[in-house]
Amino acid sequence: MSNSPIRIGYSLSLTGPVAENTKSARLAHQIWEQDVNQKGGLLGRNVELICIDDKGDPSQTAAIYKNFLDNESVDLVIGGYGTNTIAASMPVIMERNRFLIGLMGLGVNGTLRYPHYYAMIPTGPSPNTALTEGFFELAASQNPKPKTVALLSAQAEFSKNPIIGAIENAANYGLEVIYQQTYSLSTTDFTKLVEEIKLVNADVLFICSYLNDSVGLVKTIKESTYRPKMVGGAMIGPQSASVKTELGPLLNGFVNYEYWVPVPKMNFNGVSEMLEKYQQQATKENIDALGFYVAPLAYAQMQVVEQAIHATGSLDDEQLSDYCRNNEFETVMGTIRFGKNGEWDKPRVVQVQFQNIKNNHLETFKDSLSQVVVSPASYASGKFYPYSEISQE
């Protein structure tokens, strides 16, 4: 038994609306698996990651985790990607009292307060507001200051918390929400929605969207004559290489959240080497060619598991959870310490503005010239410009 591999089970939405991101996570996990096994594995045993496609359907997630724990008898489980599926797995995890590190789920444990859950997302102890606080802080810093905000979001579980945070942030920075609308994830034509928002003429347009709808919205806004002072916020998509290269110069002026970007202040130990391996393999496998958005966090997710196992000498869920609760971790995302509800003890979300994009080439997006960190000041790499100015260039 001692020679058998340590088996770690989890699900990812390898098909469905976020497949591009989850495939990036899967590759980062495989790179970690190779790295750790080359170093001799964990507790003298190789590690085997077992990943099942949940097809982006949260209703499948609980059954997948039940099967891992009841039939497959895996040693450990880790959380999948994103709010929708992680939240769906939590009842099973809580019932079995298992340790879980979820990847990029926003505010999953806010009401559950499960003591053995940890979040691999840098939104800190107040995730709903931290994701977009920098966006609204930037909006309020303009002169003259914007007065009104329109909120547009997809009808999905993942969008609920960002919208809650956006409403709170808007109020905190003295901005009035005058319009709020949702749309189905099956929407392909956004013309009527954007024209409706144009009639409202809000100074700031906050968007919470998925990959395909992000592309449609950017194109439609660019075609419209509506020019808010600021647009973007919580769009899943502009972080992806395929979306970047499809939209190219159309992205100029949009402001959006990121968790890691290639700026000197985020060159954490090991991240460049990991991304070099990732990008070489990603090109062959035809997945996100940059990997900036998901890969560092996915690799760091496994580094936390690795370091907790090394430190405790155990696979016991409670021991691993206790260690995570009381210690910090050195990862490709920098130093991580967990706090309230298993969230990071301090937020580290950056706001990026797309600038100076002249073409649709992948190379354009490999440095910080086209993706300028404009918030917070501690990571800033350039100056923010109102969308109404940049979009006219």
Image (cartoon, rainbow, N blue to C red):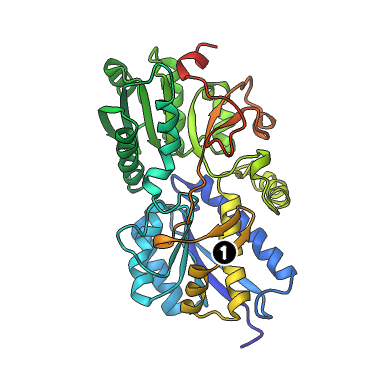
Residue 188 visible in rendering: no
Relative height, residue 189 to residue 336 (above, below): above
Q: What residue is at 54 percent from the left and 79 percent from the top?
A: 315
Q: What residue is at 69 percent from the left and 67 percent from the top?
A: 36
Please state if 185 lies on the left or on the right of 219 as rendered.
left
Q: Circle 1 is placed at which residue position?
A: 328
Name the one closer to the observer, 173 or 246. 173
Secondary-structure class at tag 1: strand
Relative height, residue 361 to residue 44 (above, below): above
- Would you identify the image quadrant in which residue 145 lies? top left
Q: What residue is at 34 percent from the left and 46 percent from the top?
A: 161
Relative image position of residue 248 (x, y in whole percent): 58, 25
Relative image position of residue 54 (x, y in whole percent): 43, 58
Q: Amino acid at mark 1?
A: Glu
- Would you identify the image quadrant in which residue 177 lies? top left
Please state if 354 lies on the left or on the right of 88 as rendered.
right
Q: Quadrant of the N terminus?
A: bottom right
